[in-house]
Amino acid sequence: MIELSQHPCQPFSLRLAHDLLSYYGSPLYVYQSEVLSHSISHITSSIPYNNTFFQFATVTNGNIELLKLFNSQGWGLHGNTPGDIYLGLKAGFSGDKIVYSGSNLNPEEMAQVLKWGVRTLNLDSLSQLDLLCNIYQSFSGDLSSLKLGLRINAPNLIKDSRIGVQPHEFSEAIKIAQTVGLKIQGLHFYRGTGTNATQAFTQVIDNIIQIGNLLPDWEYLDFGGGFGYPYRHDKVAFDWNKFGQELSHKLNQLSKPIQLIIEPGRAVIANCGILLAKVVSVKWQGKKQIIGVDTTVGNLSIPSVHGGYRKITTWQENPQSLCLTDVCGNTTYSRDYLGKNCQLPALKIDDIIGILDVGAYGYAMSSHFLHRPRPAEVLLEKGSHRLIRQREDYQVLIDNQILD
Ligand SMILES: Cc1ncc(COP(=O)(O)O)c(C=O)c1O
């Protein structure tokens, strides 16, 4: 274990970035455990409603060491896919701590989810409900604690969503469940990803409750998902306290108490992750600085492929002047940008940059497109640091190929 010149609990600095890259190589995903713990505690304490369960949306980051942190702080997981659930089980969650709220499973996958012990499932269509009921009838394990919910599609609340069952289909859903002796006990609402306007959530609470009351056996409300994170640090941030107060207040007024499930993804994990990279090329086009770095859109696809902004820093205090800068990946793919029109100091070869807030949809969305192996992942924790995923090498590009 190397000695870091800076204690890893202190705010991130250029010295720390330098030490980590010297030890682990570049590029490198770095996660700060204390930052993640702080976000988990903040969200947990912002919802006073006393029957609340928090499920981390694994789709945003599937590193098992990070999932374990959620487990240790009393959260469960939200699974979008069987793969999310598999990772959760490997991280030590039992099936009953995982809520499945995905779509379009084939029969083998639906049965597998049940075999893994998942007992709360929010289904996306009547045909998925049909499938579940068929499997239920011939399933050999204990399904006495099974709870079924419907993902809701209400065009007046969420526009243009393919997900969910419309309220006018609820009576049909209830009938399908009844034929095998099951009930529809849950309602799942997903606002759509990355919404920073708190009002977009608070103003629909009454409508959601009204829709929930259409279910005679309503027992739980899963409110998503979709809570924003202020990637532009000077812009509006989702107000967890306001949301928590308003939602709790309304739920406390219900004549029949229900359970609340909250499943944040990016809102809880975005800010603990940084992608470190080194400058490998510098050129100027007029007054614009064109920086080439040793990472690529294959390692971090959000800024370029999905149009998301991620702040890039060099941690320099009081740089003399800032220049209009494009930060480009190490391929010639026309969209290989990590940042466009950034304001950065004049940089030179071997300088270090940090792409901030990449804890969500960062490594999880990386790929082998452009055939560059993926970076390593490192966790800073309790004054120390450790590798939590190996750096890939070129072997990974041929691993599953059949070579004659
Ligand atoms: C049902 C559900 N919940 C939660 C999430 C996490 O989303 P976000 O990162 O926007 O919170 C997703 C993302 O796909 C989702 O589909």
Image (cartoon, rainbow, N blue to C red):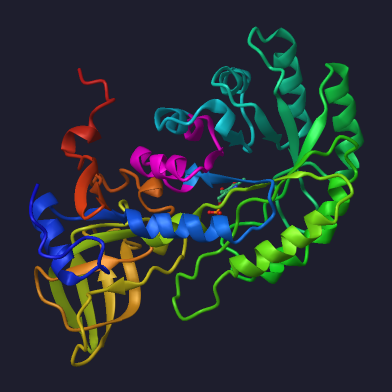
Q: Depth check: give the residue in front, 314 or 56.
A: 56
Let me know if residue 246 is in the magenta part. no
Task: Examine the rendered structure and indicate whether residue 369 appears above or below residue 193.
Answer: above
Near-viewer residue (238 or 385): 385
Q: Does 9 sit left or right of 14 as displayed?
A: right
Could you tell me residue 367's position as x and y percent? 34, 45
Quadrant housing the C terminus:
top left
In x, y percent, where is residue 184? 81, 32
Question: Is 289 or 302 nearer to us in this picture?
Answer: 302
Residue positioned 43% across, 54% down in the render: 360
Asked whether residue 278 is in view, the answer is no
Is 169 left or right of 65, judged from the image as shown? right
Residue 45 place in picture, x, y as percent: 57, 58
Task: Left or right? Give the position of 2 relative to 192.
Answer: left
- What span is in magenta? 60-85
Q: Is residue 395 above or below residue 301?
A: above
Q: Which residue sits furthest bottom?
A: 320
Q: Is residue 138 left or right of residue 267?
A: right
Residue drawn at the location 72% of the way across and 29% of the way down: 147
The structure residue drawn at horizontal position 56% and vertical position 34%, both measured from the top left corner, is 98
Residue 61 is inside the magenta segment: yes
Identity of the residue drawn at 23% across and 57% down = 295
Q: Position of residue 164 (x, y in %)?
A: 74, 43
Of residues 203 and 51, the one drawn nearer to the viewer in this rendering: 51
95 to 337, vertically: above or below: above
Residue 176 seen in the current view: yes
